Amino acid sequence: MREEMAFGSGDYVVYPTHGVGKVIGIESREIAGQELQLFVIAFDRDRMTLRVPIGKVVHAGLRRLSTRKVMENALTKLRGRARVKKTMWSRRAQEYEAKINSGDPVSIAEVVRDLHPNVGQPDQSFSERQIYEAAFDRLACELAALESIDKETATGKLEELLSAA
């Protein structure tokens, strides 16, 4: 069995643009006259079901949950100093979106760290808050799935790390 087919029913996976989902099965469908095997992935939070052709798993970026070591690296990033860039917000927003959609927890943690609202800092714009919340949510969901805890506990753990920084 090839690595990309190594997901089983009940496994948690990460789809870069949607975050953590759960494989609920594999099904066959005829599409454009071709018989395809598809992973069926449920994203409960978004009330969405995604079907990914088994042969396109690598191209789609579907992956297993991060290892504990990768998550530890991400959590270490949260404790670091925010890098304030002087470039225009529109360009930074594009960079942040790309990091979130990469699905890489370390990159997502950088976005959370850089956009975390600090005391004494001017209020964030609506788009800054939106990007921050998307990154924070994505990181909390993967942490929760990895550590088999609920999302609220994972959120509390992330907030604790951010306030200690």
Image (spheres, rainbow, N blue to C red):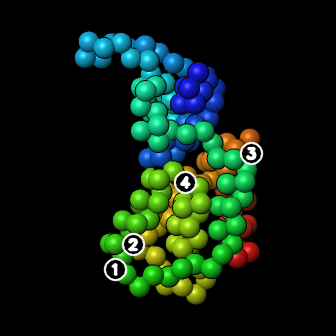
Residue 121 lies in what quarter of the image? bottom right
Disc with the residue nearer the chain's start (4 vs 3): 4
- The C terminus lies in quadrant: bottom right
Q: Which residue is mark 4?
A: 104
Residue type at numbered disc 1: Met
Q: Secondary structure at mark 2?
A: helix
Q: Are marks 1 and 2 in contact (CB under 8 Å)?
A: yes
Disc with the residue nearer the chain's start (1 vs 3): 1
Residue type at numbered disc 4: Asp
Disc with the residue nearer the chain's start (3 vs 2): 2
Point out the frontmost of discs 1 and 4. 4
Q: Is residue 4 above or below residue 92?
A: above
Q: Is residue 103 above or below residue 61?
A: below
Point out the frontmost of discs 4 and 3. 4
Q: Which mark is residue 149?
A: none
Residue type at numbered disc 3: Glu
Q: Secondary structure at mark 4?
A: loop
Residue type at numbered disc 2: Arg
Disc with the residue nearer the chain's start (4 vs 2): 2
Gap between marks 4 and 2 measured at Cα: 18 Å
Q: Pointer 1: residues within 10 angstroms few (<14), some, or many (20+)?
A: few
Gap between marks 3 and 2 measured at Cα: 31 Å
Tell me, yes or no, if residue 47 can be seen here.
no
Disc with the residue nearer the chain's start (1 vs 4): 1
Q: Which residue is mark 2?
A: 92
Q: Which residue sits at x=74%, y=45%?
A: 147
Q: Secondary structure at mark 3?
A: helix
Q: Which residue is mark 1?
A: 88
Residue 1, given in percent of the width and then of the height, sits at: 58, 21
Q: Which residue is mark 3?
A: 147
Q: Which residue sits at x=40%, y=66%?
A: 95
